[in-house]
Image (tube, rainbow, N blue to C red):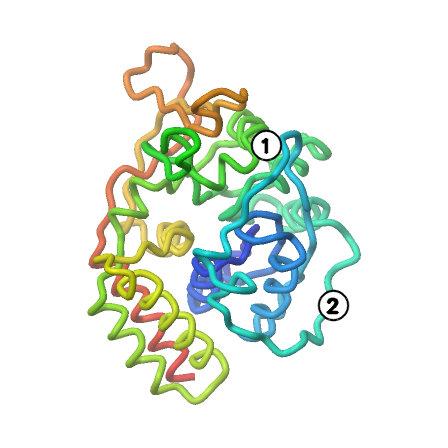
Amino acid sequence: MKKIPIIIDCDPGVDDSYAIALANSHPEFEIIALTAVEGNVPAVLTRHNCLCLDETFDIGAKVAYGATVPLVRPYFREESATHGEGGVGGIQFPAPAKQPEEKAAWDVIYEEAVKHNGELVLFAVGPLTNIATALRKYPDLPEYLKKFVIMGGGTFGNVTATGAKAEFNIWVDPTAAKEVFEKLEVYMVGLNATHAAAVEEKDFDAMLELTAKGNNKESAFLNKLTAFSKENSFGRGEDNNVIHDALAVAAEIDPEIVKFEKYYVWVEDREIENVGETVIDFKGENGKEPNCWVAMDVNQPKFVQLMKDMCKYYAEK
């Protein structure tokens, strides 16, 4: 069976780690590259985590380093409180033996897209700096992509500085996001979708039970990651946990999990109250052609079952 080549541009990150694990468990995907960008935690950590995740899951992908700062705006926040020390739930990896590619992330993305000639699915589950840089350097990149899927944006936000109108990944580099939305057809899995797919405590318990049965490094890692996710939400009195980035991957694995509707979407990149907002023209008032497939409906039980199936896959390896 010919596999679908994919690249995951990411800023690992707890939910990035789930997304990578999920993609790697899908028999129809071949992860050909992981490209790191600054985001959830500083670039030195996202780069390290990409190398370590590749080794943990025996992916054998290229790992390429990308942007360390946004295109224009200063970056002044990181999410270690959400993602734990080191960015991946406080989990300490062995020192990686793997070396990164000499070429930058945007060069690897373009070269692999050309090499696979329209078959490559590109996921971006962090800020869009690497993607915008690739488009600036290689304007013909869209011709070589089969599909471009992001976790970001949505119908509401989670950055309080913007009145919760902007989602974190878009807000970190709104200039990059604005350029990407103008140049690529985007499948946007935003917060309205990821929150609708929130995972309950009983489901984390089931994931913990499954990964505890495994006798390999993959299961051991997922067990620790799941334990962190459970404690980091339910231990704080919350009633669910949102695994944002994994839903973007799940949407491509099973089309029944996420339903998309096409609208014109633009990104506010001016330094005003709603900077980083993905503004969705639901009524067609702008008179512009729809450019973005917006995730609007989610089958939460199917998503949760997919996450459990992933845990079972690694446990039985």
Can residue 140 be seen here?
no
Q: Position of residue 213 (x, y in %)?
A: 34, 87
Q: Position of residue 139 (x, y in %)?
A: 67, 30
Residue plotted at (56% across, 64% down): 86
Q: Are marks 1 and 2 in contact (CB under 8 Å)?
A: no
Instruction: Decide: is 288 above or below 84.
Output: above
Q: Earlier in the sequence, mark 1 or mark 2?
A: 2
Q: Secondary structure at mark 1?
A: helix
Residue plotted at (67% across, 74% down): 96
Whether residue 36 sits left or right of residue 225 in the image: it is: right
Q: Residues within 10 Å of mark 1 (few under 14, many from 20)?
A: many
Q: Residues within 10 Å of mark 2 (few under 14, many from 20)?
A: few
Q: Residue farthest to the right?
A: 102
Report the label total: 2
Kind of residue sitting beneath label 2: Gln
Q: Position of residue 263 (x, y in %)?
A: 36, 25
Kind of residue sitting beneath label 1: Ala
Q: Which residue is mark 2?
A: 99
Q: Which residue is mark 1?
A: 176
Whether residue 144 sits left or right of residue 219 in the image: it is: right
Instruction: Classify the position of the C terminus by image quarter.
Output: bottom left
Using the image as rendered, state which of residue 255 and residue 126 is in the foreground. Answer: 126
